[in-house]
Image (spheres, helix red, strand yellow):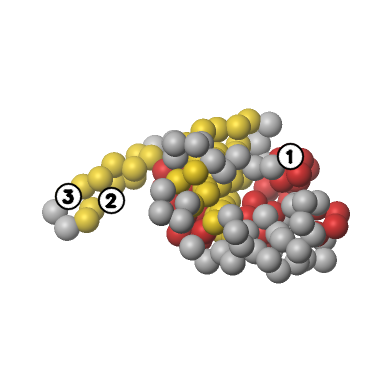
Amino acid sequence: MLLVITLGRRNFLMNRPERFIRMAYKSSIETDCTFLVGATIALGSRVISTGTCTSKTHPQNPKIKSSTKRNQLCAEVSAVLRALRKISKRQMKDCSIYVVRRRRDGSRAMAMPCIHCQEFLIEMGIKKIFYTNQVGLIKEMRN
């Protein structure tokens, strides 16, 4: 599905993954960690939640093992925890997650979820995982 965006007199076509990656990119600006990572969870064409890598902890952090550092919560986990406030775990199986990492110069970087986040996303039932690769293109990982 393509989305038409009008800026001034110009129309731009944007596919759904690009739209959600851009939302994740905007959320990555709010991070307070070394890695500028943002994530968006979508159900169909609707955004459910966004998340950022944060130095704040969460009570489930030891269970999630979202990072080698216990004082960080990965963007993917943050987005899932926020999504669970709005939808049920059963609905999560129909969701997709979009993850982007922003370099300091503003370009996109590799944002493939770590093994702990991949396990957590599988446990939550998310089947479609989109992330940016080394050159900023969108790749899909299926569970």
Query: Of the residues shown, which amino acid type is indicated by label 3?
Result: Arg
Which residue is label 1 attached to?
115
Name the N-terminal-most of marks 3 and 2: 2
> Does residue 63 sit above or below 114 in this rendering?
below
Q: Which mark is residue 1?
A: none
Dot 3 lies on which element? strand
Q: Position of residue 16 (x, y in %)?
A: 43, 42
Which residue is label 3 attached to?
10
Q: Quadrant of the rendered structure where residue 49 is? A: bottom right
Query: Of the residues shown, which amino acid type is indicated by label 1?
Result: Ile
> Does residue 122 sit above or below 51 in this rendering?
above
Q: Quadrant of the C terminus?
A: top right
Q: In the image shown, does 12 or 107 lie closer to the viewer? A: 107
Q: Quadrant of the rendered structure where residue 117 is? A: top right
> Does residue 21 sit above or below 138 in this rendering?
below
Foreground disc of the pair 3, 1: 1
Q: In the image shown, does 85 or 39 lie closer to the viewer? A: 39
Residue drawn at (21%, 47%) of the image: 11
Distance from Cα at disc 3 to Cα at disc 2 = 8 Å
Query: Of the residues shown, which amino acid type is indicated by label 2?
Result: Ile
Q: Quadrant of the N terminus?
A: top left
Q: In the image shown, does 67 or 19 lie closer to the viewer? A: 67
Residue drawn at (49%, 63%) of the image: 29
Distance from Cα at disc 2 to Cα at disc 1 = 36 Å
Name the N-terminal-most of marks 3 and 1: 3
Residue 60 appears left or right of 86: right
Which residue is label 2 attached to?
5
Q: Position of residue 95 (x, y in %)?
A: 61, 45
Dot 2 lies on which element? strand
Residue drawn at (22%, 56%) of the image: 7
Q: Is residue 109 visible?
A: yes
